[in-house]
Amino acid sequence: MAAPCSPTSPAGTEASEPPSPLGDGDGEALGAETEVAARLDGTEAVNRAVPGAALASSGAAPRPVLLVGPRFDKEYPLNPNRWVKIGRSKKAQLMLNNASVSRTHCSLRWDKHRRVVELKDTSMAGTQVNGETIKSERNALAHADRLRIEGKRIRFEFLLDLRPVGLGFNDPREEQKGLQSLKKLRGPALIQWRDNLRNQLANLTAEVQKREKEAFEKEREFHDIAMRRGLRLKEDKQRQEDLEKYTAGKKALEEKLEESRKQWLDKMSADSEKNEGEVKPIMDAVAERQVKLEKLQLKKDELERTIHPERYAVADVSRVGNYSIELPTPQKTPSAGVPSRANSEPPALDDVDAEEDAFANLLSGIPGQQAGEGPRLMEAGQLESSSADEPDAKRPKVEGAELTVKPTVITS
């Protein structure tokens, strides 16, 4: 078996050099259930696979890799949109020199636009993909898919690695090792492994149920919180609307209050001006009458002092040991024997106006004074008798001393 590993050759064209062997024809004899991996013979296939890897590492577009060899340690890159033929023909890129293999057994192509590897089977026996036989149809391959071609007393296997194009994560060789280790289990070991899997499944089922219960509780709590949050948002919206309404009402009331205040101030100002206009004449009249009353009071006091000088007598207590009270005597004029009116009456009595005359008429009812008569002079004896007729409470009392009253003679 030989394969011309020419990754740069166009799809469907012949290789420019003779095919290289992919595996020797004298393959190892195996039993009916013995599995043998495809082998690469010589360094020619390895050297031909290196340029593809070098192209991948030199900055070319990433491509899927087909793993070949007994331990899948050889790589064959799949160029985009080019069919890689696998079969017994010398024109195949991967030649399998076995009589049971068809000349063009199958073909592989990396569709760059669809990002998928296609398998096209053109054989009579078919091609197995993960143990399932495919005949005369196209299938899309996935990462770590295992291709198997049955030959005479030999099997050729390939692994598809899609990690370079970002469609796979695990190494397909490690997965195949795990599958082979499972196939080696027989008898009690397989039963024990089955029991372990059952226990793991039971534990996982219990854990899933527990997590589902917790998730249900969390979901119910979430719905409760969402419901309370919705109610709170609704209440907040209602409160905001009420606040806006109350704010508008407050503003309207403040405007109305301000307007009413202005109206009341204007009304009070008008009333105050009106009252001032009405009260001013009254106040002026009252002030005038008050002035007249004060003048009349002064005149009255002067007349009383003139008529009843004894009521306004003040005891002279400046002299120690002599408790006599002397009344002031009017000074005589320089002209002897001719009394002066200016010396006998106060100066205020000279200019009595009409109001003073009216007040003087009020004094006409005083006992002992007739209308049109002036005040009569009282003799000294009468003054003493009049003072003697007064009650004791009105007479001054001085103990241990004589009270001497000197009458004042009023001459007209």
Image: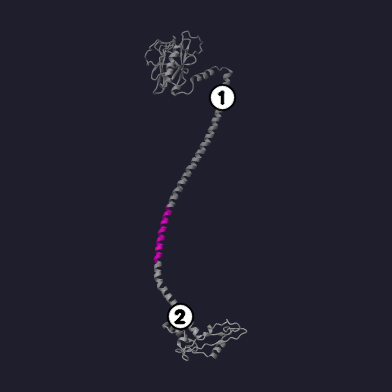
The x, y position of residue 64, in whole percent, is 43, 20
Q: Nearer the viewer, residue 123 or 108?
A: 108
Q: Nearer the viewer, mark 2 or mark 1?
A: 2
* Amino acid type, residue under disc 1 in the picture: Arg
Q: Is residue 397 left or right of residue 20?
A: right
Q: Label 1: which residue?
A: 198
What residue is rendered at 45% in x and 48% in y? 240
- Asked if residue 139 can be seen in this view, the reply is no
Residue placed furthest toward the right: 400
Q: Nearer the viewer, residue 125 or 366?
A: 366
Verify whether residue 398 appears in magenta.
no
> Which quadrant holds the N terminus?
top left
**Helix, strand or loop for disc 2:** helix
Instruction: Identify the main secondary structure in magenta.
Output: helix
Identify whether 82 is placed above or below 25: below
Identify whether 124 is placed above or below 214: above
Verify whether residue 263 appears in magenta.
yes
Estimate the spatial distance between the alpha carbons at disc 2 and disc 1, rounded to whole Å: 136 Å
What residue is rendered at 54% in x and 90% in y? 380
Mark 1 burial class by Cα count in 10 Å: few <14, some 14-19, many 20+: few
* Amino acid type, residue under disc 2 in the picture: Leu
The x, y position of residue 186, in whole percent, is 56, 17
- Mark closer to the chain start, 2 or 1: 1
The x, y position of residue 376, in whole percent, is 49, 89
Q: Is residue 212 left or right of residue 52?
A: right
Bounds of the magenta segment? 248-270
Identify whether 129 is placed above or below 29: below
Q: Which mark is residue 343?
A: none
Q: Label 2: which residue?
A: 296
- Asked if residue 255 can be seen in this view, the reply is yes
Residue placed furthest toward the front: 334
The x, y position of residue 12, in whole percent, is 37, 15
